[in-house]
Image (tube, rainbow, N blue to C red):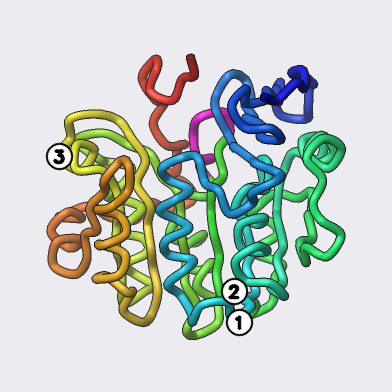
Amino acid sequence: MNASIPVTRVTDHGTAKLMPDVDRTRAWLLTVDGAPQSYVDLDDPAYLEFEYTRRLGYVLDAVAEEGRPLHVVHLGGGGLTLPRYVAATRPGSRQEVIEADGALLELVAEYLPLPPDSGVTPHAADARAWLEAAPDDHADVLIADVFGGSRVPAHLTTLAYAREAERVLRPDGVYLANLADAAPFGFLRSQLAAFATVFEELALIAEPGVLRGRRFGNAVLVAAHRPPAVAVLARRAAADAFPARVEHGAAVREFIGSARPVDDADAVPSPEPPDGAFGIG
């Protein structure tokens, strides 16, 4: 049993709280302003508690041969769950974490320190500004999991942002994003439309109930210039404790429908989740 005590700290962008998991000895849940942000098990960095992080992990496992080091850029840091996962499953990887809340990075470094040989470099910076300053063909994988509270900031939802993401990735690179929406999916469709403008291949991973419009929930966007490993992803997503479906090709184009990308001038944050959508007990 974890005998640690909760830690609460006001950071640059909210109130962060680290809560120990009573069932796992050195595991912690990070919330910001009450919204769950990350789950980290310091003894088992390959353990992914949240469903959407497992789906991102399935894609990370499939983007290259097992164990091959990658250069991964994470937009949004939280508790550094996925950087720890990549460091554990692909030793020798080079990783950069872009987190706007510098005080949150300090809190995580204090209570959830990375191993000294992790290969992870945190940067306290705005994700869009950092991306715009990054060189061309910089990374193998770009993961966007940026939320201001429970909403994706407006400047990370536009066609111009999608073009910057494509520029920073190498030609065979893969873009991943954690998004959240509900029917009629105005936000999610616009995001898919934007990335369909700059990438040839898109996939969407989400629970069937979310895709059918029955409830608000997470969806993982995969974008690349090469086809994703759809069969592998579909098997793993279907076998998850919370099974998900992988949409690709014509199904994604049908889902986009008549939606159009959003320009910077018209951008708004992603929808506010309904009460209790991502709450904790």
**What residue lies at 45% left-to-right and 75% top-to-bottom?**
63
Label 2 – label 3 distance at C-alpha:
33 Å
Using the rendered view, name the quadrant where residue 256 is placed.
bottom left
Of the two numbered discs 1 and 3 in the rendering, the one whose residue sits closer to the viewer: 3
Q: What residue is pinned by disc 3?
A: 212
Query: Which comes before the other along the chain, label 2 or label 3?
Result: 2
Residue 177: x, y in percent? 46, 54
Label 2 – label 1 distance at C-alpha:
5 Å
The residue closer to the viewer here, 143 or 269, is 143
Q: Main secondary structure of the magenta part?
A: loop
Residue 91: x, y in percent? 68, 72
Q: Is residue 30 above or below residue 187?
A: above
Which dot marks residue 168? 2
* The magenta segment: 148-154
Check if mark 2's residue and mark 1's residue have beta carbons within 8 Å: yes
Q: Secondary structure at mark 3?
A: loop
**What residue lies at 68% left-to-right and 64% top-to-bottom?**
87
Q: Residues within 10 Å of mark 2 (few under 14, many from 20)?
A: many
Query: Which comes before the other along the chain, label 1 or label 3?
Result: 1
